[in-house]
Image (cartoon, helix red, strand yellow):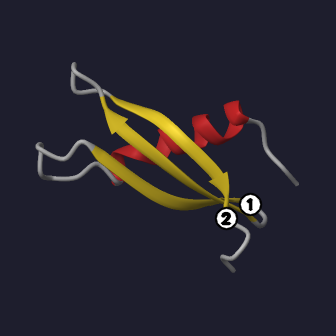
Amino acid sequence: MKHSKEQIEATANAILPHFIPKNTEEKQLSFHFTIPPSSNYKVGYEKDAKGNWKLTSYEADENRD
């Protein structure tokens, strides 16, 4: 099942705090996650000028199991 951008972004934003780098100088991050039962995604974030993390990319990650 494919999920909408809104579903992917909402899920990624909900778990984002677990992936924020401890180094405050970092400006980009990415991580993988699964929306049950078996939809895997990779998302990318960039930090804006105000220090907020914004979703910049997402893709289905078909190779994960």
Give whichever of 12, 60 is nearer the camera: 60
Q: Residue furthest right?
A: 1
Give whichever of 27, 65 is nearer the camera: 27
Q: CA distance from mark 2 to mark 1?
A: 14 Å
Disc 2 residue type? Asp
Question: How many other residues sit within 10 Å of disc 2, few (<14), some (14-19) or many (≥20)?
Answer: some
What SS does tag 1 mark? Answer: loop
Q: Residue at x 46, y 58 (%)?
A: 31
What SS does tag 2 mark? Answer: loop
Q: Residue at x 35, y 37 (%)?
A: 46
**Which residue is the site of mark 1?**
36
Left or right relative to 46: residue 55: right
Disc 1 residue type? Pro
Left or right relative to 42: residue 40: right
Q: Residue 57 location in percent, x, y?
A: 54, 42
Q: Residue 23 location in percent, x, y?
A: 12, 51
Q: Residue at x 65, y 42 (%)?
A: 8
Q: Residue at x 22, y 27 (%)?
A: 51
Give whichever of 36, 12 is nearer the camera: 12
Q: Residue 6 location in percent, x, y?
A: 68, 30
Image quadrant occupied by the N terminus: bottom right
